[in-house]
Amino acid sequence: MEWDWNFVWEIMPTLLAGLKITILATVLGAAVAAVVGLIFAILRMTAPKPIARATGFIVEFIRGTPLLVQLYFIFFVLPDIGIRLPALMAGVIGLGLHYGTYAAEVYRAGIENVPRGQWEAAKATNLTGRQTWIHVILPQAIPPMIPALANYLIAMFKETPLLSAITVLELMNQAKSVANSSYRYIEPMTMVGVFFLIMSLISVVFLRWLEERYARVEER
Amino acid sequence: MTDWSGYIGLILQGALVTLQLTVMGSALAVVMAFLAGLGRVSRFMAVRVLATTYIEFFRGTSIFVQLFWVYFVLPFAGVTLSPLQAGVLALGLNVGAYGAEVVRGAVKAIGREQREACIALNLTRGQAMRHVILPQALPLMLPTFCNNAIELLKGTAVVSLISLTDMTFQAQVVRAQTGSTLIPFATILVLYFLMALAISTSMRWLERRVTRGLDGVRT
């Protein structure tokens, strides 16, 4: 079978519509992951021991099982207990939960990397807990986290094709449906690959820039 | 009341396929990781470019897309693979690309003085790599390799979408036949978790094994 440019242009609008959903899912998933990760990190660091350990176990469990199965779980099992989610929403929750556990580790490492002296100095200057967090700890903890978080954002973007398995019409699913109706697999599948490659090459450049900008803060 | 023992058997059969995929995929991934990782620190420009292209390509596109490409597009180029072969190939190449960066990082992390000592002792590059650099770099790689192996295990779930009868696929079959969703999916989640635990435990053992005799070498 030969590569056919006309066919490529023909299917382009469908693929771009899929790309839009892919990006939407990534952005929403990232937002969920950022919040979920923060909750996990705080629970693991400050909650009473049993809760902290339970959280630790949940995080390990989510990290040790495939995202695809988790998506199936959210999409197929939850309706049995009365929670019926639209496919995209289930996908966003699945992505967010899965990558939230990764983000939690990044947060934890970032916060623990702030030297003890900073905490003590904050206490010595009589700052309240809130002031300590907002003015002392977080401004030092967040910049080094940014490249690592961006890394997971890219990883998450690359996992979004899994959402096609729970009927979200994102890039991969659009390509599959085009391929199935026209019996041409080369162009749609290759174009999906090319789209992902372009996006990730751009994001690699962006990531390098972020690293230059933020990761060296400690070396002052 | 449905007869669960038959269905559990089905899922266990799937677990076997998942295990097979993980082991074969890991083997391919390790080979690719060392080839490409050492290729990136090669003397020859062409080898470096080739290795970099491989790594960037496979890290840049998702495993899902690669798998579909291998399974659906390669047949048009005359290469027809069984789902298992396609799964092993895609998983191995994908995780191998991640592993290659680990190999490169670990090799680069070995201090300059070690290389200089090798030159002073008149070792060839091959000897230096084999007897001096790699034995020290290996312990540095293992923790990340462990994570990569778990990622590979999780990646195997995706092959169910190209109709390979792995654990996830069998769970779907059970779901379709019994109409029960909680039991098959909860079962395979636990099984996946146990497999991941087994990987990290055995990796920790391996880590102790290769670091034996290195105590005090590096602070």
Image (cartoon, helix red, strand yellow):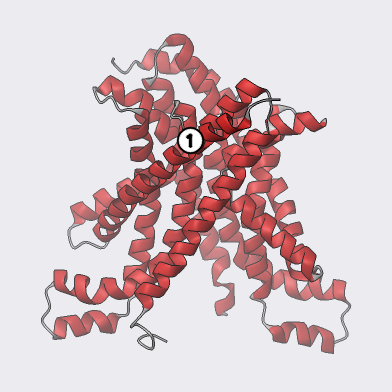
Locate residue A123: give its quadrant.
bottom right
For the C terminus of chain B, which image quadrant?
A: bottom left
**Vertical placement of residue A183 versus A190, above or below:** above
Residue B47 visible, this orientation: yes
Q: Which of A109 and B89 is in front in this view?
A: B89
> Across the whole image, how many numbered discs are drawn on residues?
1
Q: Name the residue under label 1.
A: B14
Q: Which residue is drawn at 56% across and 60% down?
A: A147
Q: Which residue is drawn at 42% across and 25% down?
A: A189
Locate residue A134: give its quadrant.
bottom right
Chain letter for mark 1, please. Answer: B
Q: Which of A83 and A160 is in front in this view?
A: A83
Residue A198 visible, this orientation: no
Give percent across and percent down for residue B11.
53, 35
Q: Nearer the viewer, residue A5 or A170?
A: A170
For the N terminus of chain B, which image quadrant?
A: top right
